[in-house]
Amino acid sequence: MPNVVNVLKQDHRTVEKLFADFKESKDRSVVDQICDELDVHTRAEEQIVYPVLRSDVPDGEGLADHAEEEHAEARQLIGRIRQTTDEEHLEELVTELEGAIQEHVSDEEGEVFPKMESAIDASRLEQMGAEVESQKADA
């Protein structure tokens, strides 16, 4: 079974690759993929990961609150991206979203994930990974 940290890191790599693909192609369909991936990823984190982070990890409450604030910022940008028809403005918004996501990924991979791995036993991390994968498959 996959460890939840590895599942979420793989999502991060997928979105990073999509941002790079957009920079090369300027293809609107790639932007739609980025937004869809982020929607599914943030929903899984908020429903499966953050409740456990709050209850089982020291300082988890603050970490989860901060992450949810970052998600709210990303959701707002995604909404603006989905509604824009101006290609030049689209590029600016995608660049802004990419910066916000890079900061979020840095926070998670640099602080949140290591704390989860030290506070939560391996079998629980694997169970959470399976739950995240299942939710993503249903999305």
Image: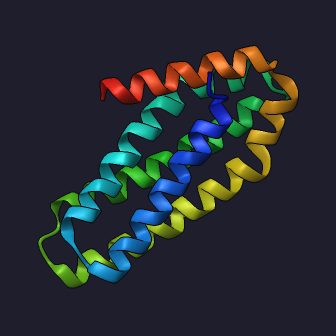
Left or right: 103 with respect to 133? Answer: right
**What residue lies at 14% left-to-right and 78% top-to-bottom?**
86
Q: In this view, does 82 lie to the left or right of 133?
A: left
Task: Say above or below: 72 vs 50.
Answer: below
Q: Could you say where residue 120 lies in the image, as x and y percent from the top left?
A: 80, 21
User: Is 120 or 94 nearer to us in this picture?
Assistant: 120
How far across and how far down the image is residue 8, in percent?
58, 40
The residue shown at (73%, 37%) is: 62
Residue 66 pos. (x, y %): 64, 44
Identify the image quadrant of the C terminus.
top left
Classify 39 as above or below 120.
below
Q: How many labels does the image show?
A: 0
- Residue found at x 47% / y 30%: 44
Q: Which colour scheme is used?
A: rainbow
Task: Decide if residue 59 is on the left or right side of residue 89.
Answer: right
Res 121 → quadrant:
top right
Location of residue 1 in the rendering, given as x and y in whole percent from the top left corner: 62, 21
Is residue 91 visible in the rendered structure shown here? Answer: yes
Q: In this view, does 13 lie above or below 112?
A: below
Vertical side of 73 occupied by 128: above or below: above
Residue 59 in sight from this viewpoint: no
Name the side, left or right, on which 61 lies relative to 51: right
Which residue is located at x 71 percent, y 39 percent?
A: 63
